Image (cartoon, rainbow, N blue to C red):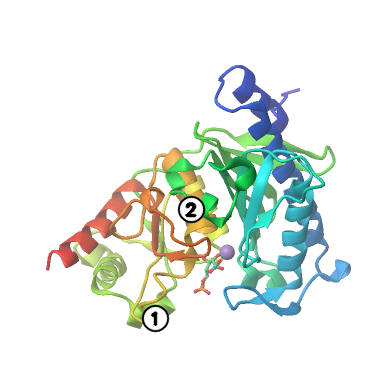
């Protein structure tokens, strides 16, 4: 019988043999993974668990919270509060940071998460997921919101779970990207796709094309060329996919390549894109780069951006290296006039 590696075994190997992660980071990741198992359980119950529908509240972004947004947020907060390895947490669903209560021991890490990405998919039984990012706190016991404002290149771990036909956990600690599938009978995460790599070239792209009339010229130029296919300057046909959950669109790209875009557009200059830098774009950019891909905001590497606020938004172009370089180049051409 073929024995596959579990997440626990993988993490212990990283700690002991490869020396790429310290023990406290390993334990923190185990706690996040355990919380994702609990979220997966609630998501899978759907209407039977009474978890579908709206919670009747709004989050800090002005988005209507679904019951499962709230449940997932609570599961992550509760599981990680007593783990002993965190100084504080930040969540898409919370306006302020969540310091570890004084009743629990504190650690040196900061955890950021989008508890349930792709909320519009919840009630229609389409894949959704949890995205997380781990930073080290530079301020120990005096951790404040300011302590979180570090560029994505400082992340020590990042990943996501997808609650779809299978529940998977995709993780990087800065030493490649690995995908684990949840074995529900065993209760363990099993390594099923080691060392995920994104091909440099692709014929698949993801963008919400209903926003086309609002795009800036470099995005319009790039998409027009893709749509023109074999008859246009690219001389090849491209296919489009849009799941409307970043986590699942990025997972497809990690599995078979592609480019994902959520550009800034002309609608509201105060909103540079829709996605949040610190708990959506940064963890995904870390994973994508670790798998050989690229991630920019059109002009700058996402991981180099110095955040000003925990909930700030950013334009995102990520995935197969040659396509991200091309669309980033079109922004440079446009800026150069
Ligand atoms: O978290 C925001 C998000 O739900 C992403 O997961 C997804 O890629 C995007 O918004 C979908 O946006 P739209 O509603 O424009 O399709
Ligand atoms: Mn999200």
Residue 10 in view in this figure: no
Q: Disc 2 on helix, strand or loop?
A: loop
Q: Residue at x 62, y 57 (%)?
A: 90
Q: Disc 1 on helix, strand or loop?
A: loop
Where is residue 72 drawn, in percent x and y?
74, 60
* Whether the residue under disc 2 has CB within 8 Å of ligand 2: no
Give the farthest residue toward the left.
337
Q: Where does label 1 land, which residue?
A: 268
Where is residue 109 drawn, in percent x and y?
62, 41
Where is residue 284 drawn, in percent x and y?
49, 51
Of circles 1 and 2, the one toward us is: 2
Q: Nearer the viewer, residue 2 or 37?
A: 37
Query: Which of the 4 image quadrants contains residue 185?
Result: top right
The image's mark for residue 204 is none
Q: Nearer the viewer, residue 60 or 127?
A: 60
| Structural crowding at the residue carrying mark 2, measured as other residues with C-alpha within 10 Å and reported as few (<14), some (14–19) or many (≥20) | some
Give the farthest residue toward the front.
142
Query: Which of the 4 image quadrants contains residue 248?
Result: bottom right
Give the farthest residue toward the top.
17
Q: Where does label 2 land, which residue?
A: 149
Between the residue at mark 1 and the residue at mark 2, the CA separation in whole angstroms equals 24 Å
Q: Residue at x 78, y 73 (%)?
A: 52
Q: Residue at x 23, y 63 (%)?
A: 331
Q: Earlier in the sequence, mark 1 or mark 2?
A: 2
Q: Nearer the viewer, residue 43 or 136?
A: 136
Residue 166 in view in this figure: yes
Taking the image in four quarters, ligand 2 sits in the one at: bottom right
248 lies above or below 111: below
| Structural crowding at the residue carrying mark 1, measured as other residues with C-alpha within 10 Å and reported as few (<14), some (14–19) or many (≥20) | few
1 and 2 marks in contact (CB < 8 Å): no
């Amino acid at each position: 019988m073929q024995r596959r590696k579990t997440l626990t075994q993988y993490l212990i190997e990283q700690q002991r043999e490869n020396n790429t992660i310290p023990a406290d980071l390993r334990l923190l990741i185990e706690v996040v993974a355990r919380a994702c198992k609990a979220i997966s359980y609630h998501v899978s119950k759907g209407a039977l668990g009474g978890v579908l529908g709206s919670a009747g509240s709004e989050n800090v972004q002005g988005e209507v919270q679904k019951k499962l947004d709230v449940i997932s947020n609570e599961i992550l907060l509760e599981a990680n509060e007593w783990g002993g390895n965190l100084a504080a947490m930040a969540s898409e669903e919370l306006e302020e940071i969540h310091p570890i209560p004084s009743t629990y021991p504190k650690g040196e890490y900061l955890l950021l998460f989008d508890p349930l990405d792709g909320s519009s998919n919840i009630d229609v039984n389409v894949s959704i997921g949890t995205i997380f990012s781990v930073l080290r706190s530079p301020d120990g016991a005096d951790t404040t919101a300011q302590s979180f404002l570090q560029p994505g290149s400082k992340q020590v771990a990042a990943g996501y779970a997808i609650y779809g036909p299978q529940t998977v956990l995709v993780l990087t600690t800065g030493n490649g990207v690995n995908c684990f599938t949840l074995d529900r009978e065993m209760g363990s995460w099993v390594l099923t796709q080691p060392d995920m790599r994104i091909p440099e070239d692709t014929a698949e792209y993801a963008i919400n094309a209903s926003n086309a009339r609002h795009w800036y010229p470099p995005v319009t130029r790039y998409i027009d060329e893709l749509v023109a296919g074999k008859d246009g300057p690219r001389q090849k046909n491209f296919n489009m996919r849009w799941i409307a959950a970043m986590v699942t669109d990025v997972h497809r790209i990690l599995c078979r390549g592609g480019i994902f875009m959520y550009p800034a557009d002309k609608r509201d200059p105060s909103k540079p894109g829709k996605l949040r830098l610190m708990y959506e774009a940064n963890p995904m950019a870390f994973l994508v780069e670790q798998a050989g891909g690229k991630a920019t905001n059109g002009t700058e590497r996402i991981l180099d951006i110095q955040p000003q606020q925990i909930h700030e938004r950013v334009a995102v172009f990520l995935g197969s290296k040659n396509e991200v370089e091309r669309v980033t180049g079109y922004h440079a051409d446009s800026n150069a006039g």
